[in-house]
């Protein structure tokens, strides 16, 4: 198989965007074209979860390939719940690695704020088990809340640890002009003050408002290319060195140990092994913190910390910018936002900037190896990517 | 790249199926496993267009991979409108050809009859251009009707030619136990008799009821595998020898010549060239006859007949079983049915049976080369596959 490189990246603000879904997607694509200097692509993948339901748009990839004047290039939409973005990157990887295509554009996009919050919550809940979870009213916040409670009891994680994740990631988001939340929060304001319960009410106990990512619109793009193409465009050589994916039982209650995220563990191992990288070699990581607990749990499953010790590392500041392994420098889903189809591509966008040394105020010094974890369902389908800076 | 083979095929009846979408998909997968003798797969692709909107099911691939006990194998949903099935097969091809996976299961499934016909028509219309077509009330039958009218004026196609396609394909469907329509129709009954207008009313003039495919539920599966795997399972060596894809402008009225289906032409050429096959070498083909006119137009664009002469070949019986190039021996979308996500995989299912000599009463004698055309949007994203029997 051929080696595969990040030739260009682009992103829209993650926020409320009152443009058609296809335009949001295309805009991020144009930004990535501009970044790469490329004006054509052999194939397009579009990651999206809800266009058909939320935006009356199916065949989205065909719409975007035309908007970007890429016809007759082929195009498909890839859906893997909130992990759609990294799944689409995996397809792009295969297309270039196999030699079938030289330049593949991967765009993730979602427009969720057109509907109200309840509809958005129901929409996301459709990725739970249709017969064992969804019909009983399970939502993603409720699954995450049950997971959090078990984690608290088993490992001693407290509400204050969860708040530390939120504060760290919203601090990082303040350094990212494309992030959804530009709001400084403090332990005093969201946990300790008299009006903390008003500022930060329970969404699904023990999860509070600031433990949950916002509902965002947005698009992000990663252009993948072969080594030959990279020679021509003269961008820094950031290689997509590892791609790992694993699934777990669809219904969360069927897992032998519901605090284990086996699909994260396996996908991370597969991705790092393919890249020849140890977890301790990773310099910067974007983990899927749709809920604050997930950043802690994933930081353990990926192998940055021992199981049950992620919250201790968090306390010690090891996951901050400047710490041992900075996590979610972009702000993460929590601070940057979570337009579901765009999220995995947005994670890759951040890592490419970091490995190029273009992350400005949030730059991790000497970052050479970056990692992303994109978490589908409630951990039932996870895709992890490892990027390595070569030159 | 490695060579890629059809290791197994499975299908459900295309009809109304009152089972959850994930079960329909899984059933076809189990049938293909049984056919191949394989009990595991390294990866799963699920082609589906409307689960999120019609069936309250997103993350469908994660549901199916668990239902089939394939975890931790990775899984994604592929959507490319009505061409989702062949698009998913293309991803499976890349996964095996690249060496990333040895056995890849490709399932197409759709459950459309849960909603009423108007909702289903609106749902399919969402693949038209959101700003230039959909908001003005365009539907797929109305686009097909305008296309038909132009074709009639330009090439002398008549309503009787359209009826010939319907009669031929429903005759073929009578020979296929999995087909949706088991109903013998005649020129007398649908065109000439006194009650023909009652039997066969206009849907969107000049298209009549029997010019349009039914709305179907169904699932189909194709298991793709490397040559090494094929040696173990001892199935006939049917190779996926050519994969072609092309896009065209999203809004139909923007095409320079709206009676040309350029994406069909390019995708077919690419697929046949990759396989080293001339159109005249093809022994059996499944074309995307969602509307009768499309079989005629595609038979020309693929290169079986000259442009504007497909209806003449039809008159001469050249596309019947026993004719020069039998088209839609399965019954096609018209007779077998059109569960959109399943259709492209269903086409491959028929071709594999034909090349194995397992198509029973509808068997094309000595079929060695088979071809499928899966038509997305109104011709804006087309995937063509060429299969060759090796032993």
Image: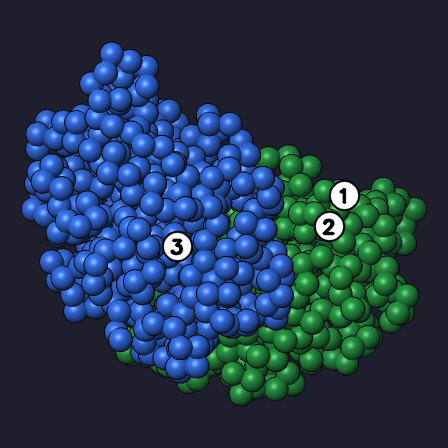
Chain colours: A blue, B green
Say whether mark 2 and mark 1 are on the same chain: yes
Residues at marks 1 and 3, common chain? no
Q: Quadrant of residue A214?
A: top left
**Residue A132 in view in this figure:** no
Given the image, what chain letter belongs to the residue carrying mark 3?
A
Q: Residues within 10 Å of mark 3 (few under 14, many from 20)?
A: many
Q: Quadrant of residue A179?
A: top left
- In the picture, measured across the screen, residue A342 lies left or right of residue B17, that is left
Q: CA distance from mark 3 to mark 2?
A: 29 Å
**Figure quadrant of the C terminus of chain A:** bottom left
- For mark 1, does the 10 Å Cα neighbourhood hold few (<14), some (14 to 19), or many (20 or more) residues? few
* Residue for badge 3: A345
User: In the current view of this chain or complex, which residue is farthest to the front?
Assistant: A361
Chain bearing mark 2:
B
Give the answer, above or below, for where B52 lies relative to B377. Answer: above
Instruction: For label 2, count other residues whose C-alpha is less than 10 Å away and answer few (under 14), some (14-19) or many (20+).
Output: some
Q: Indicate the quadrant containing the N terminus of chain A: top left, top right, bottom left or bottom right.
A: bottom left
**Closer to us: A252 or A156:** A156
């Amino acid at each position: 198989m051929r080696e595969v490189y990040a030739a260009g990246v682009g992103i829209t603000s993650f926020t409320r965007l009152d443009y058609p879904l296809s335009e949001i997607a295309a805009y991020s694509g144009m930004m990535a074209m501009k970044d790469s200097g490329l004006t054509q692509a052999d194939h397009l993948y579009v990651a999206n979860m809800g266009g058909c339901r939320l935006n009356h748009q199916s065949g989205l990839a065909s719409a975007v390939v035309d908007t970007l004047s890429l016809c007759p290039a082929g195009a498909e939409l890839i859906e893997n719940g909130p992990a759609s973005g990294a799944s689409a990157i995996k397809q792009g990887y295969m297309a270039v690695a196999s030699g079938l295509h030289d330049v593949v554009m991967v765009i993730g996009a979602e427009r969720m704020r057109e509907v109200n919050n309840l509809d958005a919550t129901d929409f996301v809940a459709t990725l739970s088990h249709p017969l064992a979870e969804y019909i009983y009213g399970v939502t993603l916040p409720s699954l995450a809340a049950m997971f959090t409670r078990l984690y608290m009891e088993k490992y001693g994680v407290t509400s204050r640890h969860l708040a530390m994740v939120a504060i760290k990631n919203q601090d990082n988001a303040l350094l990212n002009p494309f992030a959804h939340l530009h709001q400084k929060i403090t332990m005093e304001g969201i946990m300790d003050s008299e009006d903390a319960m008003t500022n930060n009410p329970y969404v699904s106990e023990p999860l509070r408002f600031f433990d949950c990512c916002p509902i965002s619109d947005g698009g992000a793009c990663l252009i993948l290319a072969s080594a030959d193409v990279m020679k021509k465009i003269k961008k820094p050589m950031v290689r997509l060195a590892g791609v790992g994916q694993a699934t777990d039982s669809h219904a969360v209650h069927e897992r032998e140990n519901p605090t284990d995220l086996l699909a994260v563990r396996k996908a991370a191992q597969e991705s790092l092994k393919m890249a020849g990288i140890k977890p301790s070699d990773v310099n910067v990581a974007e983990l899927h913190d749709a809920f604050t607990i997930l950043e802690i749990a994933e930081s353990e499953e990926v192998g940055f910390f021992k199981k049950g010790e992620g919250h201790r590392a968090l306390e010690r500041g090891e996951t901050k910018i400047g710490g041992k392994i900075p996590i979610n420098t972009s702000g993460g889903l929590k601070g940057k936002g979570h337009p579901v189809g765009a999220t995995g591509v947005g994670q890759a966008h951040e890592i490419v900037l970091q490995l190029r040394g273009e992350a400005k105020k949030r730059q991790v010094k000497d970052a050479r190896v970056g990692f992303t974890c994109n978490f589908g369902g409630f951990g039932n389908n996870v895709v992890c990517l490892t990027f390595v800076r070569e030159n």
